Amino acid sequence: MPFSATPPEGLVTLSANARTVLDKRYLVKDKSGKSVEKPEDMFWRVATVVAEADRRYGASDGAVQAVAEEFYFLMTQRRFEPNSPTLMNAGRPLGQLSACFVLPVDDALSNGQSGIYDTLRSMALIHQSGGGTGFSFSRLRSKGAMVRSTTGVASGPISFMELYDASTDAVKQGGTRRGANMGILRVDHPDVLDFIASKEDLTKITNFNISVGITTKFMDAVKVDGSYDLLDPSTGQVTGQARARDVWDKMILGAWRTGEPGVFFIDEANRYNPVPHLGAYEATNPCGEQPLLAYDVCNLGSVNVGYYVNNGEVDWEAMRRDIALSTHFLDNIIDVNKYPLPEIDSLSKRIRRIGLGVMGFADMLVRLGIPYDSAEGVEMGRKVMEFLDVEGKKESERLAKERGAFPEWARSIWGPDETCARDENGERIRPMQLLRNCNVTTVAPTGTISIIAGCSSGLEPLFAVAFMRNQAGVMMPDVNEDFVAIAKSEGWFSDELMERIAKTGTVKHADVPLKWQAVFNTANNIAPVYHIQMQAAFQQHCDSAISKTTNFGYAATQDDVRAIYEMAYDMKCKGVTVYRDGSRDNQVLSTGATQ
Ligand code: CDP
């Protein structure tokens, strides 16, 4: 039975800002560029396509229709949003619904599949479909190494990263956003210092984020001020040694100067690789929250956790139901997705990776009256992520019983065949659990979908209480509605106060009661240690990694950055990204203070 073309009647709560963003970027357009659908039509298009997957598992017409309606209201009431490619592409010719991919780059110009230029082509196809790509360039021989076929010398990983960057400029993602990439080089690659310096010039390699793949051996050498081995990428043989602290200091200097490189704790990430028998993690997606195997893909979605606070209480029951529905939604995506490469299609169906995360976490804390930078705030972070993880996995287990576990389950870290399930001390890495999905949870940045949902992004603190937001070239005013409502109800609101907050970038003004100064403290005014504590708290209950920026004030020193990097490692984070206020131009979000 075909779905009705018109969306169901019922409460839809999209803001004017959300409608603007959707109109500008996601709604289907005619030849003149005018939208031919309303946001409601778009959400119904997505809901019906995703619900269709249920039919493959025996759902009746009526059941599919009912699930489509549930998905529709889940999104239009802003309780959950899937990643942007799902909104853009569901039910349209491209039909590619995922945000994150990792492709292998082999040390050959072409080997028919994963040589440098083969992968360049795959990258273009993925960008065209709205996805972002991550690569490890660690297998490429170093600059100056011999090239046997021509007896010339190799130009090294950085030159090929530049090639990928140039190609990215030429292909807009899904025709709507700039391509995004992650470039990773292992710290034991002989060209690591060139890699660290490769983005010193802010006008270069602008379509890449870069991170150094940091090993445990390297961190051990940093701790004792020792050296570590640099390895030939082709043979694995030792080609030289470097003093770990020298390399560490250069990374820290770069991060302090420009925010790059970030670090990816590659051994820590691999410890929780659910399917090590299929390969190791060597790279992440562009924003770092998703370590992936070669040809791996992840479709993300985020629950707007601030939504569930009513009168200072969390409605855990309602959140539980929505986490289940969202998990079901993301699992369905795997079946209806049109993948850009057959290798990706095949792996995706064997491991069925999904990435359910949160957004609106800062709103949640505000509505509970808890400061982000407090022990209570961090505890709440841990609790919410644990809840999401446990409830998401319950639904994944239910789906496994109904539809089958992911095909590689038995040999995975969740399964009964314990070759992969135990660590070097013989301990199970994860308790055995029947699951439909090899990974269930991750925390994405939610850059666009948090605007659509009208909530704070990911697990980040509030960026500002009043500010101008540059969204796809349009400056949009943004004031925190919770703040305005509280100020009005308590009688200390004024337009002049809001202007002062926008100009100064802080709520620390005498007319704001101290309690609210603490609760509405914003990212730049939160001590970096709290950023990392929050990231670590979320990481404890998250299968994948966490997208998090640790903000520093302009005056922060390199030692401040170093302390945070080392703390993140000690607290078992899978990566760190820092940003020192004012250290780059073109910030997407800008408070008055940095204008
Ligand atoms: O909010 P939205 O779904 O648009 O994306 P996000 O949560 O900010 O980013 C999630 C992932 O989408 C990133 O880690 C990238 O893999 C991908 N992405 C991209 O490919 N291109 C962008 N311009 C932004 C994000």
Image: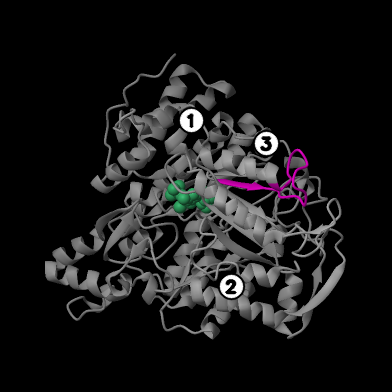
Please state the horizontal and vertical placement of residue 318, each as a whole percent of the image. 39, 45
The answer to whether residue 542 of the structure is visible from this angle is yes
Left or right, 477 with respect to 266, comes to: left
Find the magenta span and give its range: 100-116
Name the residue carrying label 1.
Answer: 50
User: How far, Cα to Cα, is label 3 from label 2?
Assistant: 34 Å
Q: Could you tell me which residue is drawn at 42 percent across and 15 percent down? A: 2
Label 2 neighbour load within 10 Å: few <14, some 14-19, many 20+: many
Q: Which mark's residue is nearer the viewer, 3 or 2?
A: 2
Please state the horizontal and vertical placement of residue 98, each as a whole percent of the image. 53, 41
Q: In this view, does 294 lie above or below 51?
A: below
Location of the C terminus (image quadrant)? bottom left
Chosen colour scheme: one colour
Label 3 neighbour load within 10 Å: few <14, some 14-19, many 20+: many
Name the residue carrying label 3.
Answer: 405
Q: Which amino acid does label 2 sit on?
A: Ala
Q: Nearer the viewer, residue 551 or 507?
A: 551
Q: In this view, does 167 lie above or below 511?
A: above
Name the residue carrying label 2.
Answer: 568
- The local secondary structure at tag 1 comes to helix
